[in-house]
Amino acid sequence: MGRVNFHFFTDVSANSGTTTNESISLNKWHHLVGELSVSDNKIRVYVDGVMQAATTPDATTIYYAGGDAPHFGKVFGCGGQDNFYTGKMDDVRIYNRALSAGEVKQLYNTGR
């Protein structure tokens, strides 16, 4: 069993994120959505079309430091070393807006 964790950098020295409390089964495809909503200042995680976690970021400004590409499947400096996701990813998307819960559910159902 595993958990889903999404982090967004919020300033030069910190990041904010949320982790699902529910375990998800391994060795099986899952539809995952990590969302940062500026309109209500929340980070949400959806697993298989259902919201599993929501938190308020530590800071209100999310930034992109430039230079580096966005990272998927990497945890920076956890336990003094970087950790990498070893599974497979397919159909990664980045939107310029937060999706509604209905849109997330529709994307999940479309891919089934």
Image: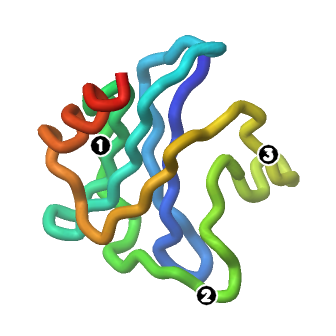
Label 3 element class: strand
Q: Circle 2 is placed at which residue position? A: 66
- First of labels 2, 3 by sequence position: 2
Q: Circle 1 is placed at which residue position? A: 54
Residue 51 location in percent, x, y?
27, 32
The residue located at (36%, 29%) in the rendering is 111
The residue located at (56%, 40%) in the rendering is 90
Residue 107 location in percent, x, y?
28, 38
Label 2 element class: loop
Q: Are marks 1 and 2 in contact (CB under 8 Å)?
A: no
Nearer to us of marks 1 and 2 is: 2
- First of labels 1, 3 by sequence position: 1
Q: Label 1 vs label 3: CA separation?
A: 23 Å
Label 1 element class: strand
- Does residue 97 lie above or below 31 as drawn? below
- First of labels 1, 2 by sequence position: 1
Q: Label 2 vs label 3: CA separation?
A: 22 Å
